[in-house]
Image (cartoon, coloured by chain):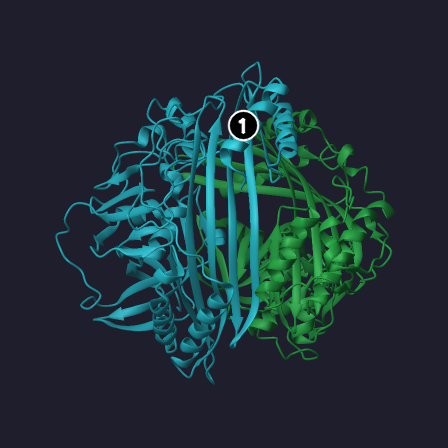
Amino acid sequence: MANVQELSDYTREIAQRLGIHKYDVYGSSTDSTSVQVDQGEPKQVKASNRSSIVVRVWNEKQTMGVTSTTDIDPKGIELALKTAQEASYFGVKENIPDFSPESTNPVVEIEPQTATIAEVPVLIETLIQAEKELIAAHPAITSVPYNGLSQQDLDHFYLNSAGAVRYERHNTTSMYLYSKTEENGKKPRSAGSFRLSNGLNQLDVDGCIKEAAEKTISHLNYQKVKTGKYRVVFSAEAFLQLLSVFSNLFNAQSILDQQSLSTPDSLGRAIASPLLSVCDDALHPQNIAKETFDGEGTPTRRTPIITDGILTSFLHSAGTAKRLNTQPTGNANIGAKVTVSPHFYHVFPGQPAQEVLSLAEAENVIWIDDLQALHAGANALQGSFSLPFDGWLVNKGERISIDSATVAGDFREVLKSIIYVESELELTPGGVCPRIWVDQLSITGES
Amino acid sequence: MPSSISLLTKELPSLDYTATPERFDITWESPLSTLLGLGRAAGADFVEFFLERVNYISCLAEEDTITSITPRLSTGAGVRVFRGIGDCYVSTNDLSFQGLKGALEKALAILGLTLPAPNSYVPEVYLELLRDYGTAKEKERWLSECSSMQEMGDILLAANDQLKRNASHVQSRRAVYFRDWQEVLVAASDGTFARDIRLTQSVGYNLLCADGENRTSNSIRDGNTSDPDFLRNWDYSTTAANLGESAGKMLYADYVESGDYPVIMANHFGGVIFHEACGHLLETTQIERKTTPFIDKKGEKIAHENLTAWDEGRSDDAFGTIDMDDEGMPTQRTLLIENGVLKNFLSDRAGSLRTGHPRTGSGRRQSFAYAAASRMRNTYIAPGDYSLDDLFNSVEKGIYCKKMGGGSVGATGEFNFGVEEAYLIENGKITKPLKGAILIGEAKEIMNKISMCSNDLSLAPGFCGSISGNIYVTVGQPHLKVDSITVGGR
């Protein structure tokens, strides 16, 4: 990425020359390296160094246009400004996006999220060793067909013609291992794990291997499950998968677009069991990719979404906050149509439960570890889902893998049917969350 | 600069290349052949450059307003270096000679190679005469002949107004359009030097209807790959009428009862079942990972004898049609399955190198950010001899899947996909609409259960996400009957 101040200077100069008085720019760049291995040999190594920016321009009629480009030298910026200026004459005439009122407010100071970048041979060696250990974990594990170790150096910035200039940078390192089994007379089985940290030194490689091995082995012996209604325990990952799919429930832009299961009047209503509380928290201590400002330059923050089952806040951009007469929450993504998205979920117990539940004692419950085909089997606008899953049937702590089953329901009913929120939080890429217990969900297995 | 060169490495910094920045033409031959020579001199077995320029725009109409016009301009390049069967891919936004050289140097370093020492001779890499599909097929005019911002806005607003008149209980209605213009140039150390221009457009509707607790969301899309007049000629009146009718039926549909059923899959986008359940498993990337049950089945029967299937890049205007793949190889028609027998896999360069299956012009990628991989183009099941009535009359109680949603296939060959519009079949007749259905199965089993194909092949545009990003594809099939499949529901 070019020096942000330098980019700001030549953007201002070009804008003046083109007669553009109001503009803003959001940009990001990524320097990344990733490796994959196959049976002890490097399979493919990828590296990239890419930048992109989004330019918004307001014309004399105050309508706005946008253009994105990867050319961030003065020539590319000039073309982007010109194209955005042309597009501005076709911009919306009502609810026109504007600068965030908080685009020049101070942002929270956070600890640096950078780490030493590992050399490619170190990444390859680490992954080869992980593959070797995972295959050695059980004779049935014959390969790790999906694996990867990658590191990214990311930076992003925001500037506007009112004087805002923001910039920050962080590193992430991630590993995934998905192993596959082959045994005579049995179906191939597969399971995996994922880890994320700032640098390779902090990455829990051993934990990733161990979890992938344990899960894969746990699926070796499997059985069909009878179709019926079950008490279901969602893993942190599975619950956050569902929450993300149905995030239009608290997305202010979706609500204003009538693309939501909520309306502006839904605030203050009970939408979940009082046992559940949910926040969006970009600055959560366990989020290793904290961002202190969003695509409009608004400082990010912790936003309570559901408190003891009550819908307490929507996630906002500057524009949705203005329309709903509230404050932006730092969840905007810049564009011709500004969109809103969560940063990092924090799901935790709300009101105390009357009964403590435990997988060690529960009988005949379905433990869903991972949901599949969310793009095909979940309808975010209807609330319904019917999804294949990986999981186990659990009886007093003993679990057996389930073969080919689906879980179906309505997410609004799921929220209301929560009977227990465990206290121990698990870190996932999308946030931190405990296991969530839900009563009476439809499971389709064998008749 | 001469078109082919032999030089000393110490001369590199002073070279004054004048490749045209706004166009990938013959002026790129010298810098690219020099870079390819450098890569080979460093010890690489094979080097390939992929250069890309994109001019993309999308337009969104919500209710009676254009709420988004989003242009995107991007340029970039990727260099792929092979050493043995291992490879490395480096991408960059910097298309200057030094930028490309930097990317090459990084790729070489990752593979343990270094650029030749000062005063070393850089061997010549002779590139073929530029194979320019852009010029040869008169594609240069395409971009300027597409709809302007004003025109796309006007058409989408008119279309959205039409939808309002064709649907009831409308909560929201959207008309969406995009145009993706792409210029690519491929140069490789085997002499490949080819340029193409692609124009991909798509237009469609998203409709959400609600009546009390009853809700339905329905969508429809059309696509094209070579007609600048595509949006102008969009028959939105018919499209709106069809979508409004489907939404009206699905709004009050009951949830499907889960179980195993015989299923009739509609033609057109119904072809997604073959794409997911079989097509992906015939890509050499799956052989490399050993994640396909068909790995050693070439020449063997893997499907019902009534089933023949193709993957090709040649159908006029279809969404997966390409003149060359992203490795510069001319496209082809590839017979996948003939009367149930597996005939060919889909292979890119790396897949061919690692599995031995010949390249099929199937090396595709979303953009310069990805290395090419074996991917599908226009993939479809060939028409059969049955009539549609034959199929329905053979079903006592089953499900008619008229409109499919998306789907996926996992590492163990299990697939699943949603059904957007389904109906109950009783005694050969459609009786009532059903919602919430998801089809689940295993590729190996399902292929032998496709027992009847009708004679009404129809193709549909689709988007496929996989190892080399999201690409445009066609799925297709005639109406067909699956004897039994698990349907997930309530």
Residue B64 visible somewhere in the drawing: no
Quick one: quadrant of the C terminus of chain B? bottom left
In screen coordinates, is B229 left or right of A281? right
Residue B14 location (% of width, % of height) = 74, 49
Identify the image quadrant of residue B357. bottom right
Residue A265 location (% of width, % of height) = 32, 28
Chain B display color = green
Q: Is residue A31 above or below residue A189?
A: above
Residue B131 location (% of width, % of height) = 84, 54
Residue type at numbered disc 1: Asp
Farthest residue toward the left? A354
Report the front residue among A189 and B381: A189
Report the front residue among B307 and A346: A346
At numbered mark 1, what does the secondary structure look like: helix, strand or loop?
A: helix
- Residue carrying label 1: A9
Q: Residues within 10 Å of mark 1 (few under 14, many from 20)?
A: few
Chain A display color = cyan
Q: Is residue B209 above or below residue A33?
A: above
In screen coordinates, is B302 left or right of A210? right
